[in-house]
Image (cartoon, rainbow, N blue to C red):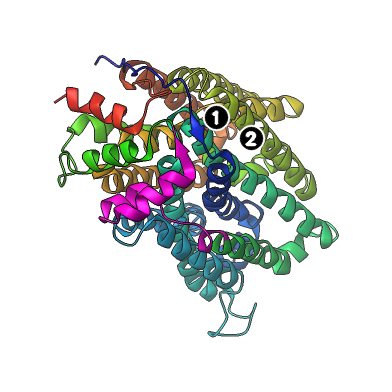
């Protein structure tokens, strides 16, 4: 496949209302903050969930307990699948802004009730393993919210951003995700320290405070979305041209607002309807980008970082502190991506990141395998996180928001993001099963899964080199014409 996309000459003067554009991008990116916060909050509560709901099930085998534990942690990801599937049609029918409001409300409900799953059913703390079912229901609801936000927030940002700033502004989503993760790592650490570093206190009470803390950013996201307009693309899609033009005039652009609106409307009337209007390869590329992002093993590291460090002998406080250091690296390298994505381009960053991740995961596997514990393991984890945060973390969301033409964007992104969450679940569930397998640990000492992730990271870099077009600096309509030529 020829993956060269030619850009039209850039206008000499760009008239963009930066303060409004950046403000709206930050507001939408709060969905990413909640995405990161809610997906990572479970990292501090995993052992507590095992203690409360899994360990008392002595009737189950080791494999069954590990599988049940992985399911309890990963159930939110099935909610993410549903959320991402309904988010596209919902964002098309009701609007990007309304979709964000619904997601914020579901976040709030999930954060409170997953912390107190016994509420309305029995005594708080008195139901034992029976509380696992409502806990999983409420975590599933939170997953629906995550799935919705993961699709709608970058879509909103891409549709209000001028082409020359779109990569940077969509990267706000990933910065918000990793900032949410770092924030919750800090919150989890402080909550654990509030209990005096006593594991029993965390097992009995601390985990509830960790999960309930997500209520605060949920309210902030709701209030932000309440104050935001919808995007020009959605208004045009609904025939509300006056409102679309008003938003375009407020945002500014690299061309006359009337011309910008005409371009948007022209793109909406091309190939309307079928998901595969622009060919199967386009949808396949979106799906594979999402799958490779997850199969690199990122969420095995982010969800299970405290467990990973405990596997090498760290105490609870120390494991959470090391996890927070990993979170700091995640944010720092995402900030590097913010600068590089519109300078270096999408494709070089993805290839570079894939190679860094492959080398780092192979190193982690070898360190576990040969029992080389200590600082080297933390360094390898930081390099891995750095490689991901520089590339596959932010750039995949940029590409997913860019690659699909407006006429099929909602449905196409729903398919791609659903694939992302299914792959995420596979990684989350399988890590707990494989890492807890006595036979594999006797042979590899917790290193086996990291070798697997190294192989997928290398495959991801090769996939990008062969199949992904460069979209840096192009308008959404120019990218659409690239796929039209492939027909």
Q: Would you say 126 lies left or right of 417 here?
A: right
The quarter of the image holding the N terminus is: top left
For this orientation, the residue located farthest to the right is 196
Residue 37 is situated, as x and y percent measured from the top left of the image, at 60, 52
Q: Residues within 10 Å of mark 1 (few under 14, many from 20)?
A: many
Decide whether residue 237 is among the magenta residues.
yes
Residue 398 is situated, as x and y percent measured from the top left of the image, at 44, 34
| Residue located 53% across and 32% down the image | 168
When asked about the image quadrant of residue 111, the answer is: bottom right
| Residue located 19% across and 27% down the image | 484
Decide whether residue 122 is among the magenta residues.
no
When asked about the image quadrant of residue 199, the answer is: bottom right
Residue 208 is situated, as x and y percent measured from the top left of the image, at 66, 67
Q: Residues within 10 Å of mark 2 (few under 14, many from 20)?
A: many
List the residue tagged with mark 2. Answer: 330
Q: Does the rendering let one see residue 296?
A: no
As measured in the structure, the alpha-carbon distance from the residue carrying label 1 to the one carrying label 2 is: 8 Å
Q: Provide the major secondary structure of the magenta segment.
A: helix
Residue 388, numbered label: 1
Residue 345 is situated, as x and y percent measured from the top left of the image, at 47, 20
Tell me which numbered mark, 1 or 2, is placed earlier along the sequence: 2
Magenta region, residue range: 224-253
Residue 282, numbered label: none
Q: Is residue 167 shown above or below 323?
A: above
Q: Are marks 1 and 2 in contact (CB under 8 Å)?
A: yes
The quarter of the image holding the C terminus is: top left
């Amino acid at each position: 496949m020829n993956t060269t996309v030619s850009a039209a000459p850039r206008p000499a003067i760009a008239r963009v209302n930066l303060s409004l554009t950046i403000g709206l991008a930050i507001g939408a990116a709060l969905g990413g903050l909640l995405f990161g916060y809610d997906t990572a909050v479970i990292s501090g509560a995993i052992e507590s969930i095992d203690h409360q709901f899994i360990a008392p099930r002595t009737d189950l085998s080791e494999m069954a307990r590990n599988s049940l534990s992985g399911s309890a942690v990963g159930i939110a990801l099935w909610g993410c699948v549903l959320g991402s599937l309904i988010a596209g049609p919902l964002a098309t029918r009701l609007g990007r802004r309304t979709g964000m409001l619904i997601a914020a409300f579901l976040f709030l409900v999930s954060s409170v009730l997953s912390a107190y799953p016994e509420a309305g059913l029995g005594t708080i703390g008195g139901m034992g393993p029976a509380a696992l079912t409502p806990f999983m229901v409420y975590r599933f609801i939170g997953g629906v919210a995550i799935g919705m936000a993961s699709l709608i927030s970058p879509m909103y940002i891409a549709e209000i951003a001028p082409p020359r700033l779109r990569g940077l502004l969509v990267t706000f989503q990933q910065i918000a995700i990793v900032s949410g993760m770092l924030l919750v790592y800090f919150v989890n650490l402080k909550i654990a320290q509030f209990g005096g570093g006593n594991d029993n206190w965390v097992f009995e009470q601390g985990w509830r405070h960790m999960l309930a803390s997500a209520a605060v950013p949920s309210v902030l996201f709701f209030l932000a979305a309440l104050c935001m307009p919808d995007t020009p693309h959605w208004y045009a899609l609904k025939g509300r041209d006056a409102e679309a033009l008003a938003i375009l005039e407020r945002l500014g652009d690299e061309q006359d607002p009337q011309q910008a609106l005409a371009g948007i409307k022209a793109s909406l009337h091309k190939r309307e309807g079928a998901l595969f209007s622009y060919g199967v390869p386009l949808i396949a590329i979106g799906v594979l980008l999402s799958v490779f992002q997850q199969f690199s093993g990122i969420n095995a590291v982010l969800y299970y970082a405290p467990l990973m460090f405990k596997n090498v002998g760290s105490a609870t406080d120390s494991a959470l502190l090391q996890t927070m250091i990993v979170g700091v690296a995640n944010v720092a390298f995402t900030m590097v991506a913010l600068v590089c994505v519109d300078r270096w381009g999408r494709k070089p960053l993805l290839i570079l990141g894939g190679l860094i991740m492959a080398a780092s995961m192979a190193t982690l596997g070898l360190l576990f395998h040969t029992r080389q514990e200590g600082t080297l393991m933390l360094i390898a984890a930081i390099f891995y996180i750095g490689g991901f945060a520089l590339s596959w973390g932010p750039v995949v969301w940029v590409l997913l928001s860019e690659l699909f033409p407006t006429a099929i964007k909602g449905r196409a992104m729903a398919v791609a993001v659903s694939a992302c969450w299914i792959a995420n679940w596979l990684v989350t569930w399988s890590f707990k099963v494989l890492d807890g397998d006595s036979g594999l640990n006797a042979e590899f000492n917790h290193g086996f899964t990291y070798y697997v992730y190294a192989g997928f990271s290398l495959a991801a870099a090769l996939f990008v080199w062969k199949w992904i077009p460069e979209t840096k600096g192009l308008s959404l309509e120019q990218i659409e014409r690239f796929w039209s030529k492939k027909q």
